[in-house]
Structure formats: structure tokens, C-alpha cells
Image (cartoon, coloured by chain):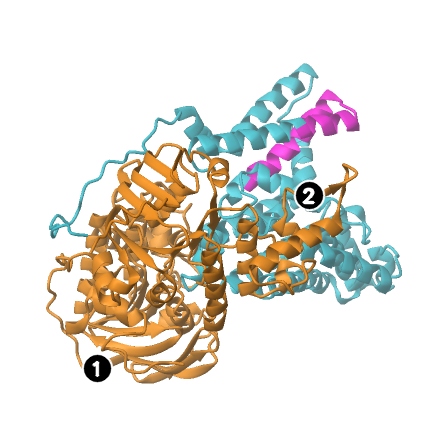
């Protein structure tokens, strides 16, 4: 306290905490999941060659993309919820189911309107989740899980537990039947005869998601909210709005996934989307997004989705049984997560 | 001033001789002699950071590397672990309660030594009877020991805590701010218990920042400053002013450069009858353009609460706020910032900064909307602004892409200040702007604050650092228990006058609440 006036405006201080960091770890941390994706691709090529096939053959690439397309669509939105620090949206399965039901139920209004209604149901679910969690501060896991149950109940009561088929729901007019056929076809369209429309939609959703995440003011606010809710609040950021928006984006993406799911299976039912809550969370986390929020990227999430798909593809090349497949999947995912954590810790970020 | 209680032949309850404790880089306690007689309430006084807590932690056995000798009832003891301290007869009552709120009183009291029955089961009857005995000692004989801690009052919980400590039969009882959360009547109850324990022959070491309590309850007082003992005397031989002077030391040679004060008559912010029941009541003040106004008072007087209500984070029950003559009521902090009111929080790590993000992210966090184009936004557009602000604050290293948590505390605080400079508000509330930062960083922050008001802005300063208030402020309003009880003009602001006024005494106190 009794120091004299120090006129030096910039007191140079030595950074005493400096430590050596392994270059490989920095590189791994930068590239993240894509290192794994490349490794899996190389592995896939070798295994495919041994089995006398081609990993990069049109049919194989197509099957990989098709397998992960639905998951990818959902992940492109789920990343916002995880990034905002709300861990997981447990209502994803029934959001998907609801979007499928609504689309099929309104198929008589024509395909575009049915599609819009399906998407709108997703937006509404997102708004409700967002209101409860963002505004009323409900526990995100408990609320979305409970809401999932509620939606499941609503669907079963309203439709009497029945499955809906677009062609039987559609009235006996040419217009309605055409709409039903268009609906079925969206999951079976191949652009240029090679790439599935579903894969294209997934990539487009990821592109939009990347843009929102890194180029908009919402993305910048989300970064702060996810890192430290209180700090964001004390910077004048409307956290409620940001959290609500993250749920709307998530549920809308899930609705897109749900509509394609119903079209692919040719049925809409309350069972559609079962298991997508955790498989999608797995992809997001594999992509390097922190469960606690504030860290991660859309590009990484796409990597996570691809790693998930390629691994499954490789395992079917090898011809493993379902149970063995689960075991191998588990080991690989644990390894990826551990390497991620390890590299973060080595960089002092963990 | 200093009288040695020697030659009486009396055995001291506690004698610490030449006790020192060194932390890396600082000598927290420097060769302190500290004596406490049996049946005496001995106050230990000093400003924050004077070394009182460290000395008491030595006594509690939290350090095994202190130097010096400690005698308890004439017997030399080593206090290297908390258990050794407890066995030596030291009982500690901490400021924060260490009771489990959701279990019953008797379980809390007898935790770890509940009487057993048949080797396996707890003898509930015996336990309750034993708990009753403990409670009787602190005057809670008619309290049912089976109720949960959560269901009794703060004062009773504090007394249960004391009962728990007393159950170990200590000979020396250390009480660190035992009344900080109690009302006036409850304080009296607490004092009655203390007097009773004193009569039983216990030596009580009492730490409090409330001067009035010291004069009421203590027999003797030891004052510490900068890790050293600077005085010891009977309470009857000293008054508040003398005590404060001992605590603060000689009037500190201010290192604050004289600022060419440019306070205009223009009122920037006016607060009338501002009330949030239970926190602050009927608060009125005006803030002028170019002025630094201190809201001064003890911790817990409601200073931070006023700030939070002003910026729209907490609701308030009554009152009006005028900004530039127009009445405003902010629904959230975002509105306040847009209107030009900023708040630099006292809690840098939790509410101040997003620690795992970069400097640029943090500096721009208040003004994302302002610098966005439609829905588009990129930090890259504002690199010049970020660089300008972090250079103004001399953030070292001046790297806008570095994560904030890799900076030292002082530099983090500078980043926080840079954030508010970038926010471009014209009223800034600074809540402990230099807490826990080194002298250089403090200097830089103070200079920036002065420059900021010279540019025609206004600052409200909330600080427990008295030299800071003396050096920076043009006026101080005194807040005590949620009421503004007086105002000190620039000429009158000294550490002594601030401390005395904060305790509700002295010439500047114009109205006494209660």
C-alpha cells in the first residue's frame, strides 16, 4: 500500500507458469476427431481390400452416408443444446416420432404443407423445452426426459397406439396419393443416382449449423452462455433467449430427422426415433464437444457422426455379430473420449 | 499502550511466543506474541490480510510448518494437526456453520461419537440425553434435540455449533465473527452465553469487525497489522478512534496522484427511496458527471445488493431511478448496459469472466449486439477495438486470442476492466475492482478509473479497501444495515472516518436507523 507512484504503464511480468507442451498433443487437439476419422478410413480401406471389396466404391460410400444421415441431421441441432451446457435433449426420440406422425397425418393437405406442419411440431416442442429450461430453469435432463414420456403418452392416446401409413391416411384422390408417394420418395431419392438425398440434407443442415454457430451473434452469445451462464448474464446477454433458441434449433433438426425416418420406414409411430437420444449424444461428444458446454464445434460433430458410421461400416466388413459389435464400439468410443480428455488435460484446458 | 500481564504469577491459558508462518512469497505472520488469560474474552483485531486468520489457523493446527512456541496452560504443545490442537484444548467456532442442515441436532452434536447399544445399534435415548446436556450449556435447554438444523433459527444453529465445540471440553475457544449473521437481540443472547462461558474459566478469543461488539464483550484486545502484533491493552484503556488508528497504522501516505477533479453539477444518476425489503431501505443518492462516489460500509451492509438491483439483475420493491433525468426501470442487465450503466462484479471467476474463452470473446461480450450486422457477427471485425482496450489496461501478455484462465489474477482483473471500457457505458459501478490483485495492477486500474471519469463519465465505487476509497473517491455515502446513515465529503474521507462511520459513529453520521 505504501508503494510510490509507479509511472511505468506496462509492468512486464514473466509468465512463470510456462511449460513445455508435446507438439503431437497440440496437433491432435486441433484436428480432434478427424484424426480418428482418417485412421478409420485407412483401416476401412485395408479391411475392404482384404475382403476383396472397395471402401471408396459408390455403394459403400452411399451406405455409410445413408446409415449416419438420420443421426447426422439430429446431431446438427443437438450440438446447440450440449454446447449451451444443458447436456442432452432427452425428448429427441419423441420429437422425431411426433414430427413423423404430424407429417403423415396431414398428408392430405399436400406434401409441402405436411412437411411444414411436421417441422412446426418440432419448433413447438423446442419452444416448450426452451421456455421450461431457459425461462423457468427446469432441470434440463429431468424436464426433457419427462416431456419425452408425456409426448409418448399423447401420441399413443391421440392415435390409439396405432402406426400411421401415409398411403392409407391419404384420401383416395390423386393429389393426396401423390403427396404420400412424394413423402415416401424423399428417403429414396439419389442425386445423380449416387448420393442419397438424406445425406445431402444432412450435409446442408451441418452447413447451416456451422454458419449459425460461427458467424452469427447468436453463436457468439451461445459460446459465452455455454462457458459460464453467470458471466454471460452479467455481460447483459439474454440467456433465456439463447437457451430457448438452442432448444428450438435442436428440436427442429430432430423433426427433420423424424420426417425422413418415417419416410424411410414407411410408417409413423411412437417408436420412431427410439435410441436416438443417446446415439446422437455419443456422436456429439465424440466430436469433441464438452458435456459441460462452451466447447466444441460443428465440424467436429460431423467428424463424430462420420466416425460412428465408418466404424459400423468396418465392423460389418469384418462380419462381426451384433454383440461383438457392441463391445468393439464401446472400446473404440471409450478410447476416443479418453484421448480427447487426455489431450485437453495436457494442454491445461481440461 | 502495551502492558505485560506478567508478575502476577498467574498461569496463562494460551501463550504464543514468536510465532511465524510463511507462505510462498509472503510472511503472513511475523514473530507474533499472543497471550490470553483464563476467564477472559480477548479480541483479536486487524484489517483484512493483517494475519489474524492465519494466526488462528496456526492455533487450529492447520499448519505443520509454523515456527515459534505455543504454551497451553503453561505446557508447551505442538499443534501440527487439527487433532493435536483439539487434544490440546483448542475449540474453533467458524464463521460458516459446519452443521449438516438436513439431520437432527443431536446427530450433529455427537457426530462420530454417538453412544452405541449392543455394539451395533445407536442408543438414541442416551444420545438425546447427552445432547440435552450439551445444549443446556449454551442456554438451549428447552430445544428439542431431534429437530433438524434446517428448522431452527440462524442464532440457535450458531449456538448449537458452539455447543458442539464445547462438547470436546476445550480450554480455549476461538470465535471468528460469530455474530455476522445475527440480529441485534440474537447478538445479546450470544453475549450472555459468552459471559457465562467466561465465568466457567474458558479463555475466549473473539474476532469481529464490529467495533461496538468489541467494546461490549471483550476484556482485552490485541491488534495486528501486516502480519505483526502492533499493540495489546485492556479494552477500558482505549476508544474506537485509537483502535482504528492502531489497525490502520499511521495515516497512509497516499500514492494516489491528485486528479484534476472535473465534477459538474449535472446529475447522471439519481436514486430515490430505493428499497428491497430486508436488504436495503429508502436509499437516496445522486451521482454527478465526472464523480467517483463511494458506497461505503461493512461487508453485508447491502452495498452489492443495491448495485444488483440498480442494474436490473435483482428486483426491488420500491423507489425510483433516474438516469440523465429520465426515470428508468431495467428488466434485465442487457437493458441497463444499453442505457449506459455497467457493473464490474466482485466475483471475477464466476460471474465476471468466461474463463475458458479468449480475451477477445470476453472483452466483446457486452457489445455483441452493438457490433453485429443483422444476425451476423464475428470477433475478427473488432480486433482493433479489443487491442485498444487491452493495451489501455496493459494486459500482459497482450494477446487477444489467449484463454483468460491462463492469465494471472491481476491480468484477469484487467481483462474484466477492459470489457467494461469496451462496453462504453457512462455510469460504471465498480464492486471491489482491485480485490486480490497486486500493487501494479491496482495502480493501472486506478489510473484507468480516473481517466474514465475525466472523460465525463461517472463511477460508483464499492470497496472494502479503505486506502482505495480514500485515494479515489470524491464523496462517500455511508451504508449501515441497509440504510444510508450519512455522507462524507472529499475533505473528510480518511480511513479512520470511513471505519468509524461504517460502525455508526462519528461526526458524519447524520441519521441513526433504529
Residue B404 visible to an observer of this rendering: no
| Residue A243 picture location, percent across and down | 55, 59
| Residue B70 picture location, percent across and down | 36, 37
Callouts 2 and 1 close, C-beta under 8 Å: no
Residue closest to the eye, B376 or B160: B160
The residue positioned 45% from the left and 57% from the top of the image is B198
| Left or right: where B393 falls relative to A219 | left
- Report if residue B454 lies within the magenta region: no
Q: Is residue A47 above or below residue B154?
A: above
The orange one among the chains is B
Q: Chain of mark 1?
A: B
Q: Chain A, which colour? A: cyan
Residue closest to the eye, A278 or B137: B137
Q: Secondary structure at mark 1?
A: loop
Q: Is residue B150 above or below residue B396?
A: below
Q: Main secondary structure of the magenta part?
A: helix
Q: Residue furthest top?
A: A50
- Report if residue A305 lies within the magenta region: yes
Distance between mark 2 and mark 1 Cα atoms: 60 Å
Q: Is residue B166 above or below residue A44?
A: below
| Residue B504 picture location, percent across and down | 32, 74
Residue closest to the eye, B19 or A115: B19
* Magenta region, residue range: A301-330
Q: Which residue is mark 2?
A: A278
Quarter occupied by residue B141: bottom right
Amino acid at each position: 500500500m505504501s508503494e510510490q507512484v509507479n509511472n511505468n504503464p506496462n509492468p512486464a511480468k514473466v509468465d512463470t507458469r510456462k511449460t513445455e507442451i508435446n507438439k503431437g498433443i497440440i496437433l491432435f487437439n486441433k484436428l480432434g476427431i478427424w484424426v480418428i476419422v482418417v485412421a478409420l478410413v485407412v483401416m476401412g480401406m485395408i479391411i475392404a481390400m482384404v475382403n476383396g471389396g472397395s471402401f471408396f466404391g459408390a455403394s459403400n460410400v452411399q451406405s455409410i452416408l445413408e446409415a449416419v444421415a438420420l443421426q447426422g441431421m439430429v446431431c446438427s441441432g443437438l450440438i446447440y443444446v450440449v454446447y449451451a451446457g444443458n447436456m442432452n435433449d432427452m425428448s429427441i426420440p419423441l420429437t422425431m416420432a411426433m414430427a413423423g406422425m404430424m407429417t403423415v397425418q396431414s398428408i392430405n393437405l399436400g406434401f409441402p404443407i405436411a412437411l411444414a406442419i411436421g417441422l412446426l411440431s418440432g419448433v413447438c416442442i423446442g419452444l416448450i423445452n426452451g421456455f421450461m429450461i431457459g425461462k423457468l430453469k427446469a432441470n434440463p435432463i429431468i424436464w426433457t426426459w419427462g416431456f419425452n414420456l408425456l409426448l409418448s403418452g399423447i401420441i399413443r392416446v391421440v392415435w390409439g397406439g396405432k402406426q400411421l401409413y401415409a398411403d392409407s391416411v391419404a384420401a383416395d384422390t390423386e393429389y393426396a396419393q401423390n403427396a404420400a408417394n412424394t413423402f415416401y420418395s424423399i428417403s429414396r431419392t439419389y442425386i445423380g443416382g449416387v448420393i442419397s438425398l438424406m445425406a445431402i440434407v444432412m450435409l446442408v443442415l451441418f452447413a447451416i449449423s456451422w454458419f449459425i454457430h460461427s458467424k452469427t451473434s447468436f453463436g457468439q452469445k451461445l459460446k459465452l452462455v455455454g462457458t459460464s451462464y453467470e458471466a454471460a448474464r452479467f455481460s447483459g446477454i439474454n440467456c433465456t433467449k439463447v437457451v430457448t433458441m438452442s432448444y428450438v434449433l435442436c428440436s427442429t433438426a430432430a423433426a427433420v430427422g423424424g420426417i425422413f425416418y418415417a419416410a424411410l420406414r414407411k410408417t409413423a409411430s411412437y417408436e420412431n426415433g427410439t435410441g436416438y437420444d443417446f446415439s446422437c449424444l455419443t456422436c456429439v461428444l465424440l466430436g469433441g464437444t464438452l458435456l459441460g458446454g462452451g466447447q466444441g464445434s460443428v465440424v467436429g460433430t460431423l467428424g463424430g457422426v462420420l466416425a460412428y458410421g465408418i466404424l459400423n461400416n468396418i465392423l460389418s466388413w469384418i462380419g462381426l455379430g451384433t454383440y461383438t459389435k457392441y463391445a468393439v464400439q464401446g472400446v473404440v468410443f471409450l478410447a476416443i473420449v479418453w484421448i480427447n480428455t487426455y489431450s485437453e488435460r495436457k494442454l491445461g484446458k481440461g | 499502550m502495551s502492558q505485560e500481564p506478567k508478575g502476577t504469577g498467574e498461569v496463562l491459558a494460551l501463550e504464543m511466543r514468536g510465532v511465524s508462518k510463511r507462505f510462498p512469497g509472503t510472511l503472513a505472520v511475523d514473530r507474533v506474541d499472543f497471550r490470553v488469560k483464563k476467564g477472559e474474552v480477548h479480541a483479536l483485531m486487524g484489517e483484512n490480510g493483517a494475519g489474524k486468520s492465519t494466526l488462528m489457523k496456526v492455533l487450529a493446527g492447520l499448519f505443520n510448518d509454523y515456527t515459534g512456541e505455543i504454551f497451553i496452560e503453561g505446557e508447551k504443545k505442538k499443534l501440527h494437526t487439527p487433532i493435536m490442537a483439539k487434544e490440546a484444548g483448542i475449540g474453533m467456532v467458524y464463521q460458516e456453520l459446519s452443521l449438516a442442515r438436513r439431520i437432527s441436532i443431536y446427530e450433529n452434536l455427537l457426530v462420530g461419537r454417538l453412544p452405541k447399544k449392543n455394539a451395533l445399534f445407536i442408543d438414541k435415548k442416551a444420545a438425546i440425553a447427552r445432547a440435552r446436556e450439551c445444549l443446556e450449556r449454551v442456554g438451549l435447554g428447552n430445544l428439542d434435540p431431534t429437530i433438524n438444523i434446517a428448522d431452527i433459527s440462524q442464532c440457535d444453529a450458531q449456538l448449537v455449533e458452539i455447543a458442539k465445540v464445547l462438547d470436546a471440553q476445550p480450554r480455549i475457544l476461538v470465535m471468528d465473527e460469530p455474530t455476522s449473521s445475527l440480529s441485534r437481540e440474537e447478538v445479546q443472547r450470544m453475549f450472555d452465553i459468552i459471559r457465562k462461558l467466561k465465568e466457567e474459566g474458558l479463555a475466549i478469543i473473539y474476532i469481529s469487525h464490529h467495533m461496538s461488539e468489541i467494546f461490549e464483550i471483550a476484556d482485552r484486545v490485541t491488534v495486528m497489522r501486516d502480519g505483526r502484533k502492533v499493540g495489546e491493552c485492556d479494552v477500558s484503556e482505549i476508544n474506537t478512534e485509537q483502535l482504528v488508528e492502531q489497525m490502520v497504522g499511521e495515516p497512509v501516505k497516499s500514492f494516489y496522484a491528485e486528479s484534476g477533479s472535473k465534477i459538474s453539477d449535472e446529475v447522471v444518476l439519481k436514486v430515490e427511496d430505493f428499497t428491497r425489503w430486508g436488504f436495503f431501505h429508502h436509499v437516496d443518492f445522486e451521482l454527478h458527471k465526472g464523480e467517483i462516489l463511494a458506497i461505503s460500509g461493512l461487508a453485508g451492509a447491502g452495498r452489492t445488493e443495491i448495485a444488483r438491483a440498480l442494474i436490473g439483475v435483482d428486483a426491488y420493491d420500491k423507489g425510483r431511478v433516474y438516469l440523465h433525468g429520465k426515470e428508468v426501470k431495467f428488466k434485465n442487465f442487457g437493458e441497463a448496459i444499453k442505457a449506459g450503466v455497467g457493473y464490474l462484479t466482485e466475483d471475477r471467476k464466476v460471474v465476471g469472466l468466461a474463463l475458458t474463452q479468449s480475451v477477445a470473446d470476453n472483452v466483446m461480450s457486452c457489445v455483441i449486439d452493438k457490433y453485429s450486422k443483422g444476425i451476423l457477427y464475428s470477433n475478427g471485425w473488432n480486433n482493433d477495438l479489443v487491442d485498444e482496450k487491452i493495451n489501455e489496461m496493459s494486459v500482459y501478455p497482450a494477446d487477444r486470442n489467449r484463454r483468460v484462465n491462463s492469465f494471472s489474477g491481476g491480468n484477469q482483473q484487467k481483462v474484466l476492466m477492459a470489457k467494461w471500457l469496451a462496453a462504453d457505458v457512462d455510469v460504471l459501478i465498480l464492486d471491489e475492482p482491485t480485490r486480490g490483485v497486486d500493487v501494479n495492477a491496482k495502480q493501472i486500474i486506478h489510473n484507468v478509473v480516473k481517466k474514465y471519469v475525466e472523460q465525463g463519465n461517472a463511477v460508483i465505487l464499492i470497496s472494502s479497501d479503505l486506502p482505495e476509497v480514500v485515494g479515489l473517491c470524491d464523496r462517500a455515502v455511508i451504508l449501515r444495515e441497509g440504510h444510508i446513515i450519512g455522507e462524507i465529503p472529499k475533505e473528510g474521507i480518511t480511513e479512520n472516518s470511513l471505519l468509524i462511520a461504517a460502525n455508526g459513529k462519528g461526526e458524519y453520521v447524520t441519521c441513526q436507523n433504529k
